[in-house]
Amino acid sequence: MTDFMLDPRLETDTFLLTDLPLCRVLLMNDSRYPWLILVPRQNGLREFHDLSREDQSRLMSEITLTTEALQGGHGPDKINVGALGNIVQQLHIHVLARFESDPAWPGPVWGIGEPAAYSKKQAGSLIREFRIQLGRVSS
């Protein structure tokens, strides 16, 4: 396997959370929403169907794992899952907790207001929390 390269925009906009068997899990640096991004650690992927059938199934399992971690840790009203790739073409999946009280509800989060970056302390705390949640739901 070649060295995995993360798109520079994803690297700039996120914190590394952990690596699952297939995906790198990132925390979006926007404190308005508990927002995870899964990136399969294979270069050259743009679309879901670029993955092998086995990895497609693994990706669905890892999406489920992260949705359960968000649900358990934050109790959102809804969890949104999406893979757009119009700006960042590298295959990545957004998994974010939504609340009726959030600034974009009920519409999409993109283009609504300005991102509110986490402080180092907030990010560290949330990263630890998500690592614990992911550990609970994966066992």
Image: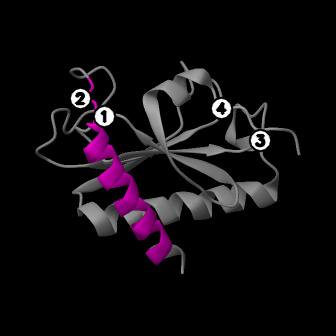
Badge 1 is on which residue?
Answer: 30
| Residue at screen point 53% across, 57% down | 63
| 25 displayed left or right of 130 | right
Q: Are marks 3 and 4 in contact (CB under 8 Å)?
A: no
* Residue topped by disc 2: 116
Q: Which numbered disc flags the more N-terminal residue, 1 or 2?
A: 1
Question: Quadrant of the rendered structure where residue 4 is?
Answer: top right
Assess whether mark 4 and mark 2 are in contact (beta carbons under 8 angstroms): no
Label ID, residue 6: 4
Q: Give the range drawn in magenta.
A: 115-136
**Relative to residue 33, is residue 61 depicted above or below?**
below
Q: Residues within 10 Å of mark 2 (few under 14, many from 20)?
A: few
Residue tagged by mark 3? Answer: 42
Q: In the image, which is nearer the foreground, mark 3 or mark 4?
A: 4
In the rendered image, residue 116 lying in the magenta stretch gets the answer: yes
Disc 1/disc 2 C-alpha distance (Å):
5 Å
Secondary element type, mark 2: loop
Q: Where is residue 120 in the image (x, y as percent from the top left)?
A: 31, 39
Q: Which residue is drawn at 35% across and 49% down?
A: 124
Q: Where is residue 11 in the image (x, y as percent from the top left)?
A: 54, 29
Q: Where does the image place residue 35, in percent across and percent down from the top left?
A: 37, 44
Looking at the image, tell me whether mark 2 or mark 4 is earlier in sequence order: 4
The tag earlier along the polypeptide, 3 or 4, is 4
Closer to the observer: label 2 or label 3? 2
Quick one: label 1 or label 4, which is nearer the N terminus?
4
Residue 53 lies within the magenta run: no
Tell me the crowding category of disc 3: few under 14, some 14 to 19, or many 20 or more residues within 10 angstroms, Cα based: some
Badge 4: residue crowd in 10 Å (few <14, some 14–19, many ≥20): some
Q: Mark 2 vs mark 3: which is more N-terminal?
A: 3
